[in-house]
Amino acid sequence: IVGWNVTDDSGRKYVYGDMDDITAIRTGNVARKSTQFALCWPKTYGKVGLAEGGEAYPFPQTWNLKRMEDLKGNYLTFDYMQKSEKLAINGWKSSFGYTKECYLQSVTSSDGSKVVFSLKPKGEGEFVNEFLDMNGITELTESDADAFVDPIERYYLYKIEIFGKHDALMSTVEFCYGSLSLAPQGTKDSRYVKRLLKTVVFSNNQGEEYDRESYIYNTDASGNSPETNRPLGMLDTIMGSNCGKVAFEYTYTKTKNATGVGLHTDEVLFSHPS
């Protein structure tokens, strides 16, 4: 299946996946836009998933929204960026790669206006070791082939630009982040780092800021009781540019099974290093 055509009760049409891949999928030279792929072995093992040797081909497994169109012919198109990775084990390497990650890059309307989503690589500066692979090792933004099928998100959204007709910039939304570094048993470990959205800045077409929101999170790890402590990184407050504020309160709950025994996970004590 290379894609789907769906029509709702109002007559609006939705296209999912790269429908033009109907021929290319037999050769493996697929577009890799709105359709995401696993690997399959139709000529040898006859299955989808992790395997060694043989001829591996792309196998569609996710169909992202590519186009919307109403009865008047007005439409939106959705463009994506994909990163793929090949499999390699014991001297064998696949000819094609599976979809390791996929991101929405832009939405364009039939009148020429569009929204552009800009990404940057994770794991840089204070966010080192922000993501790990299946072996618990920091994975490079452009990683080499290995024996694991391990989809991962190695990019983050830092800006949205809104354009009118003829590529005229109308406004920009920028996302600023801070890091929350944790310390298991009181010892700081760079593997425990979390990216937190700290500020959203809204600017006009001249680059002048006209609004912003700030986000404040819990960083207090004092005490040991889960009944009195909120986990690190929980959102406390959203602050607006004109002194507006939204505060959050949380209640500790514990789930029990039929025998009345509480369901829980093993706890690791964390402290926020100064």
Image (spheres, grey):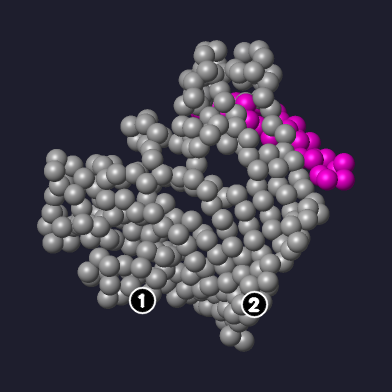
Question: Which amino acid type is shown beneath numbered disc 2?
Answer: His
In the picture, which quadrant includes the N terminus? bottom left
Separation of residues labelled 1 and 2 (CA atoms)? 28 Å
Helix, strand or loop for the magenta stretch, by majority? loop
Residue 254 is one of the magenta-drawn residues: yes
Q: Which numbered dot is residue 20?
A: 1
The image's mark for residue 166 is: 2
Q: Is residue 35 above or below residue 74?
A: above
Residue reaching furthest to the right: 242
Vertical placement of 235 versus 8: above or below? above
Residue 228: give x, y in percent of width and height: 69, 19
Vertical order, 182 against 137 (above or below): above
In the displayed structure, 79 sits above or below 141; it is: below
Q: Is residue 213 left or right of residue 195?
A: right
Q: Residue 118: name its quadrant.
A: bottom right
Q: Secondary structure at mark 2?
A: helix
> x, y percentage for residue 222?
67, 14
Residue type beneath disc 1: Asp
- The label on residue 142 is none
10 Å crowding of disc 2: few (<14), some (14-19), many (20+): few
Q: Position of residue 265 (x, y in %)?
A: 49, 24
Question: Along the horizontal axis of the image, is 243 left or right of 271?
Answer: right
- Closer-to-camera residue (253/155): 155
Q: Earlier in the sequence, mark 1 or mark 2?
A: 1
Magenta stretch: give its range: 232-260
In depth, the one of 15 and 57 nearer the eye is 57
